[in-house]
Amino acid sequence: MASRRRLSSELTIMTGNANPALARAVCRELKVPLADTMVSRFSEGEIRLKINENVRGKDVFVVQPTCPPANDNLMELLIMLDALRRASARRVTAVVPYYGYARQDRKDQPRVPITAKLVANLITTAGANRVLTVDLHAGQIQGFFDIPLDHLFAVTVFEEYIRRKRLKSIVVVSPDVGGIKMARAYAKRLRADLAIVDKRRDSPEATAVMHILGEVKGKTCLLIDDLIATGSSLVEAAAALKRRGATSVLACVTHPVLSGPAISRIASSALQELIVTDTIPLDAKRRHPKITVLSVAPLLSEAIRRIHYEESISTLFDGMQS
């Protein structure tokens, strides 16, 4: 017990400007104060940072998603990691609920970068000893890191909410072939059928739905995806499901990027409800009555607690193995 109290006193949570509300929620769950950190800008726009308390020998978790503005938030994360390394923190874990720059995870065209690997290198070089993240855009990104990475899944957060709604005749739908594994895991947990939207991508922001594999007529369709940017794919999928006779269409999407015309598209779409998490904060312009926000703070705080006490976190992955 004495050792446990000693470790607890060394646990430190800090954040930048990316999602301070989520960091505060994690601190409330863990019953620890948020570290006093000053993150501001010099007159020319460069990031200025100072950690206003002693972190020597402490186990530090930096809660900082690399959400829009992605470049600013990524640089804040890198600078915080560097500062903590130079301040002799015992271990530094980058808690990146939303891992940005993840959509370019392979060379699928000539002369394009693999930005997911580049960002992994930057985080490691800056001083992170470990990374904790939620619903990566591609599972292979785990292999881009040469340090331990814990990949959490928001399925438990969504599952609890969906069960409370007591929906009838649920069919879990993957909006594309690439999301089948995630959709299958949701279907297994919800004891639901599975369907797939087969689509052709006309451009990075526009898609044309071809046809649907699976029976959706008279069913409540639950679209599953890791992120929503402009909303084109999800809106087209919802419209196709309604044309095929679905009684209602809901969507569970972990990361609400919601860029460009996303809100107007959702507002006029066939979606009854878009359920997202707070891995990315939503300002007033990106709020809508159709959008429900669930918190991943309990999930993150439990993972942080287990990492801090060197306990297994494999039970947090249960149900995501296909």
Image (tube, helix red, strand yellow):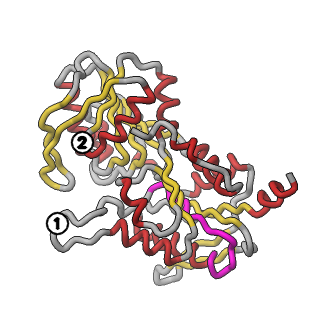
- Residue 89 inside the magenta-drawn segment: yes
Classify residue 287 by image quadrant. top left
Q: Is residue 91 left or right of residue 230?
A: right
Say which mark, if any, is on residue 176: 2
First reached walking from the N terminus: tag 1 or tag 2 = 1
Q: Do labels 1 and 2 touch, CB within 8 Å? A: no
Residue found at x 80% / y 54%: 4
Report whether 118 appears left or right of 315: left
Quadrant showing the C terminus? top left
- In terms of secondary structure, where does tag 2 sit? loop
Q: Nearer the viewer, residue 45 or 30?
A: 30
Q: CA distance from mark 1 to mark 2?
A: 20 Å
- Residue at horizontal 21 percent and vertical 31 percent from the top: 239
Report the amino acid beneath label 2.
Asp
Q: Is residue 146 left or right of residue 308?
A: left
Q: Which residues are magenta?
A: 84-98
Dot 2: few (<14), some (14–19), or many (≥20) neighbours within 10 Å?
A: many
The image shows residue 151, relative to residue 127, as above or below, that is: above
Please state the horizontal and vertical placement of residue 266, each as a whole percent of the image. 30, 39
Task: Identify the secondary structure beneath mark 1.
Answer: loop
Instruction: Give residue 129's position: percent from left, percent from top.
Output: 57, 69
Please give the count of numbered marks on the rendered protein: 2
Give residue 109's mark.
1
Q: Nearer the viewer, residue 103 or 14?
A: 103
Q: Residue at x 70, y 49 (%)?
A: 30
